[in-house]
């Protein structure tokens, strides 16, 4: 089932909840995006929950928060999902240390980070270890702005086909949800998992 591709702490929590209660307002454990309102309702049934769960990847496709690292130029914006914002637009001061603050921001916004800083894969691994949380993916761009625009343009036009090592049905839309490292600096671009969590091991 697609939803389990998101190796997040919340999934086992919900399963435990459905198993033990069937229906309840304790659905508050489910704190993600559009479902937040539903989760607050006392009338949420187990069935409704499964509906939400099954549709999560679809919802995240509509809303794709991406956060653009401060070193990157505004020229990239037209090639990124419409919801993309710079760190500064998210209220973070210029020069804020990458670790842990930029990742804290991405966690709060459940956003994929777009950066040209090659240190971030390491930062994310560390963040996940230290916070015992799964992040929301990472897109690493080449260092040069002309190359950044070029690779994003080709990605948007569908000229770059990203492949997930284990998922033949992978689409770029899932990268944030599935916490993937989309390495557009590599040639050809590569997609790998960032998750190192126990949910990942259970697959
Ligand atoms: Zn994980």
Image (tube, helix red, strand yellow):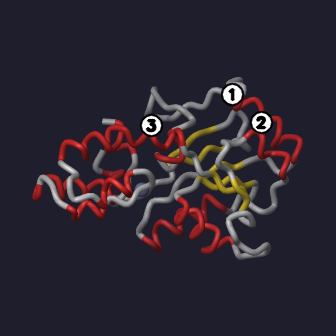
Residue 48 coordinates in the image, percent (x, y)? 24, 44
- Name the front one of labels 1 and 3: 3
Compared with 29, 23 (above or below) is above
Left or right: 30 in relation to 185? left
Left or right: 10 in relation to 97? left
Q: Residue at x 59, y 51 (%)?
A: 65
Residue 164 coordinates in the image, percent (x, y)? 51, 34
Q: Nearer the viewer, residue 47 or 42?
A: 42
- Disc 1 to disc 3, C-alpha distance: 22 Å
Quadrant (top left/top right/bottom left/bottom right) for the C terminus: top left
Q: Residue at x 35, y 42 (%)?
A: 3
Q: Neighbour class for label 3 at 10 Å: few (<14), some, many (≥20)?
A: some
Q: Neighbour class for label 2 at 10 Å: few (<14), some, many (≥20)?
A: many
Whichever of labels 2 and 3 marks the residue nearer the N terminus, that label is 3
- Disc 1 to disc 2, C-alpha distance: 8 Å
Compared with 101, 32 (above or below) is above
Quadrant (top left/top right/bottom left/bottom right) for the N terminus: top left
Whichever of labels 1 and 2 marks the residue nearer the N terminus, that label is 2
Q: Residue at x 85, y 53 (%)?
A: 73
> Mark 1 highlights which residue?
160
Q: Residue at x 32, y 44 (%)?
A: 52
Provide the secondary structure element on which disc 3 rests. helix
> Mark 3 highlights which residue?
58
Whichever of labels 1 and 3 marks the residue nearer the N terminus, that label is 3
> Mark 2 highlights which residue?
151
Q: Quadrant of residue 118?
A: bottom right
- Disc 2 to disc 3, C-alpha distance: 25 Å
Q: Are marks 1 and 2 in contact (CB under 8 Å)?
A: yes
Left or right: 158 in relation to 12? right
Provide the secondary structure element on which disc 1 rests. loop
Residue 127 coordinates in the image, percent (x, y)? 52, 69
């Amino acid at each position: 089932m697609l939803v389990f591709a998101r190796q997040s702490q919340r999934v086992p929590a919900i399963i435990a909840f459905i198993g033990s209660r069937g229906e309840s307002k304790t659905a508050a454990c489910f704190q993600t995006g559009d479902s937040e309102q539903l989760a607050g309702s006392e009338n949420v049934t187990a069935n409704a929950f499964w509906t939400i769960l099954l549709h999560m990847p679809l919802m995240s496709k509509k809303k794709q928060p991406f956060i653009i690292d401060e070193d990157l130029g505004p020229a990239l914006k037209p090639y990124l999902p419409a919801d993309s914002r710079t760190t500064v637009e998210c209220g973070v001061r210029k020069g804020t240390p990458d670790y842990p603050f930029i990742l804290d921001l991405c966690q709060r916004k459940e956003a994929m980070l777009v950066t040209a800083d090659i240190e971030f894969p390491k930062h994310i691994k560390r963040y996940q270890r230290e916070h015992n949380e799964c992040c929301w993916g990472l897109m690493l761009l080449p260092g040069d702005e002309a190359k950044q625009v070029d690779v994003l343009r080709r990605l948007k036009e569908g000229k770059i086909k990203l492949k997930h090592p284990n998922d033949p049905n992978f689409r770029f839309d899932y990268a944030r949800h599935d916490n993937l490292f989309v390495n557009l600096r590599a040639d050809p671009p590569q997609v790998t998992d960032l998750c190192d969590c126990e949910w990942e091991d259970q697959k």
